Image (tube, helix red, strand yellow):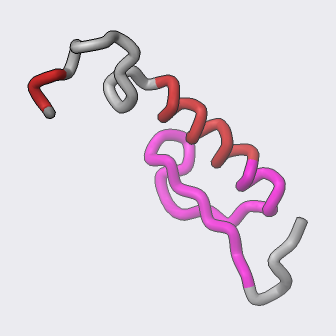
Amino acid sequence: MSGGQKFEYLWADGVKYKKATPLPAPQYISLLMDWVETQINDEHVFPVTVGMYMLYL
C-alpha cells in the first residue's frame, strides 16, 4: 500500500509516538485500526449500559 511519493503517513498517539512520526502505510493503518478499536471499546465514549449517561441527553 502506498499513496505515492507525494504522501507521508505520520502517526502521533501521545503515548508511544509523542511527535508525528513517519511510518510505512501498512504500519500506519495497523496502528489506526488498533486506535479505532480502543475508541469503540471505551465505555466512556460509547456507553453499553442503558440509561447510564442519560444526563447528557
The C terminus, quarter of image: top left
Judged left or right of residue 30, residue 15 is left
Furthest residue in direction bottom, as rendered: 6
Q: Magenta part of the protein: which range? A: 7-29
Vertical order, 32 against 21 (above or below): above
Q: Tell me the residue at 59%/58% (across/down).
A: 11
Q: Image height check: is 34 above or below 22?
A: above
Q: Is residue 34 magenta?
A: no
Which residue is found at the position 79% from the left and 62% from the top? 25
Residue 16 drawn at (x, y percent):
55, 41
Q: Is residue 9 magenta?
A: yes
Asked whether, in this view, residue 38 is left or right of residue 2, the answer is left
Q: Position of residue 34 (x, y in %)?
A: 65, 36
**Residue 27, how many percent across, how many down?**
78, 51
Name above or below for residue 42 compared with residue 26.
above
- Relative to 51, is 16 on the left or the right? right
Quarter occupied by residue 8: bottom right
Nearer to us in this view, 19 or 53: 53
Q: How many marks?
A: 0
User: The N terminus lies in which quarter of the figure?
Assistant: bottom right
Q: Nearer the viewer, residue 52 or 45?
A: 52
Q: Residue at left 30%, top 12%?
A: 50
Residue lying farthest left?
Answer: 55
Q: Quadrant of residue 31?
A: top right
Find residue 6 and report its horizontal and vertical position in percent: 76, 89
Q: Write the residue at 52% across / 55% down.
A: 12
Q: Nearer the viewer, residue 49 or 31?
A: 49
